[in-house]
Image (cartoon, coloured by chain):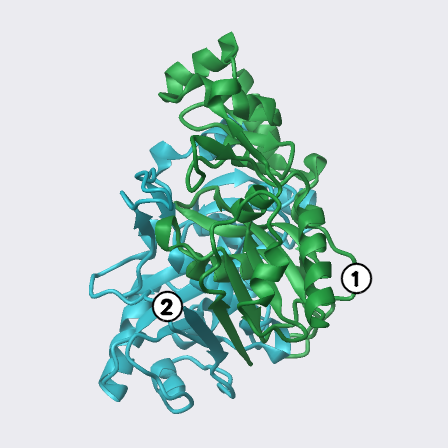
Chain colours: A cyan, B green
Amino acid sequence: MRMEAFTVDDIPLVKPGDDIAAMICERAALEDGDVLVIASTIIAKAENELFSLDDITPSDRAIGIGKKDDKDPRLVEAVLDRCSECFVESPVMLVQSDRAHVCINAGVDDSNVENDLLADLPRDADASARSIGERVEEITGCRVAVVVTDTNGRAFRLGQTGVAIGLYHATPIYYWRGTKDLFGYEMQISEEAVADEVAAAANLLMGEGSGGNPVVVVRGIPLFTEEKTSARQLYRPDNMDIIKKALRIFQES
Amino acid sequence: MRMEAFTVDDIPLVKPGDDIAAMICERAALEDGDVLVIASTIIAKAENELFSLDDITPSDRAIGIGKKDDKDPRLVEAVLDRCSECFVESPVMLVQSDRAHVCINAGVDDSNVENDLLADLPRDADASARSIGERVEEITGCRVAVVVTDTNGRAFRLGQTGVAIGLYHATPIYYWRGTKDLFGYEMQISEEAVADEVAAAANLLMGEGSGGNPVVVVRGIPLFTEEKTSARQLYRPDNMDIIKKALRIFQES
């Protein structure tokens, strides 16, 4: 089995209203079953999900957290505005983002945006993935899967990895259910977060900063599915999440 | 930029004492800079890190947890024996393993082992990676990186992904330190867990069960480093780990 992944080179700076699907199709020869992995930042720019700190008046709470975290209180206010729950305030803000899932700073990105603007996450990254995927199909006639990515830190481990926050025709989790193991025993159910693994693989090629490549094509793995899928299928339900429970009790203590 | 990953096919069932490096070199044409990604299970088998539940007498604590979790109390005892701290007992055992890091069941694997034996994690997966890497260099003359993998669940997200638990000449984390972003601003430090991303990418091809491929070669990314590296560089230090602190307080509550 062989997989390849390659960057779609020379994507220009994305501006509000840009047609990302067309930009990709002009620069890559796509095939049926390809997985298009797209960094959420360029989608946020195309969708004009940008804002300026100058328009934000920080609350007392934001000023307090800003002092503790040595962070601009207007940025803190922006994060508080974009989350339904703040699990950790300091030294970093770990929150339940309104637009994705649990992440640092509600996914607000202050790099690679012009004119002192900050990029939000896309409002609905599944919808962004669908819109780009359908447009790619329209232009090329190819059936593709789309994975919109962000980078997230992890519990217990250092560093960030690429994760999926929006899916279109991409399998989120593969269930090794009732498969036989090498000795014929039925395996216990095992769930592989394949969409996140694809996001991680693509992130190896995306890089950051001025040399960054926001679009990667992954070819050779059966991630494409005819089914309607959503990145929300990757999010652990609140009532099954022991770590969230522990963080809530920790915050009260 | 282009990366490829392919399975090393037809690796036979591994038995204690087997020379995994030779098995790989007979079946793949390796090149300088290749990353060999190897599932920890076959290393544990080659290193004879197998045990039988029949040799274990469960403690009262293990019997209690076994009842709560509907799990063989001898398996629970084996997990307790292999960890320095148990963060969550039920519905699954999330522990600080003696051999790797925080994981479910201390990494004990009850699939794909013969004769009712269970596989431990390798005793020192960095040492296993080094031993295989040096032997590959001896056989082929190629300088390769080696990543030994396990699969781990994640906080907040469903499903498991491949992670690195042993490294040889493989960069654990890439630091985007002081890089300029697209607009010339200096980026804040950002840490990318590249070894885990490679483990995740390879896990897409490894599969599970009888069709599993325990060895994958990843080519085209600059993971190889001349430096001595360790998977421990990926583990968040205890005193920096808010989630561990929260889990300890939660357990006492």
**Contact between labelled residues 1 and 2, with CB atoms less than 8 Å apart:** no
Q: Residue at x 53, y 36 (%)?
A: B107
Residue that label 2 marks:
A221
Front residue of this view, candidates B124 and A171: B124
Quarter occupied by the N terminus of chain B: bottom right
Local crowd at mark 1 within 10 Å, few (<14), some, or many (≥20)? few
Q: Chain of mark 1?
A: B
Vertical relation: B21 (above or below) B42: below
The quarter of the picture where residue A75 lies is bottom right
Q: Amino acid at mark 2?
A: Ile
- Residue B198 visible? The answer is yes
Q: Residue at x 51, y 74 (%)?
A: B4
Front residue of this view, candidates B124 and A208: B124
Vertical relation: B56 (above or below) A151: above
Q: Position of residue B28 (x, y in %)?
A: 55, 70
Q: Residue at x 57, y 60 (%)?
A: B23
Q: CA distance from mark 2 to mark 1?
A: 32 Å
Query: Is residue A120 found left or right of B166 in the rendered image?
Result: left
Q: Position of residue B170 (x, y in %)?
A: 68, 61
Residue that label 1 marks:
B227
Q: Amino acid at mark 1?
A: Glu
Q: Position of residue B102 (x, y in %)?
A: 58, 36
- Mark 2 lies on a secondary structure that is loop
Front residue of this view, candidates A149 and B173: B173
Looking at the image, the residue that sits furthest to the bottom is A26
- Residue B191 visible? The answer is no
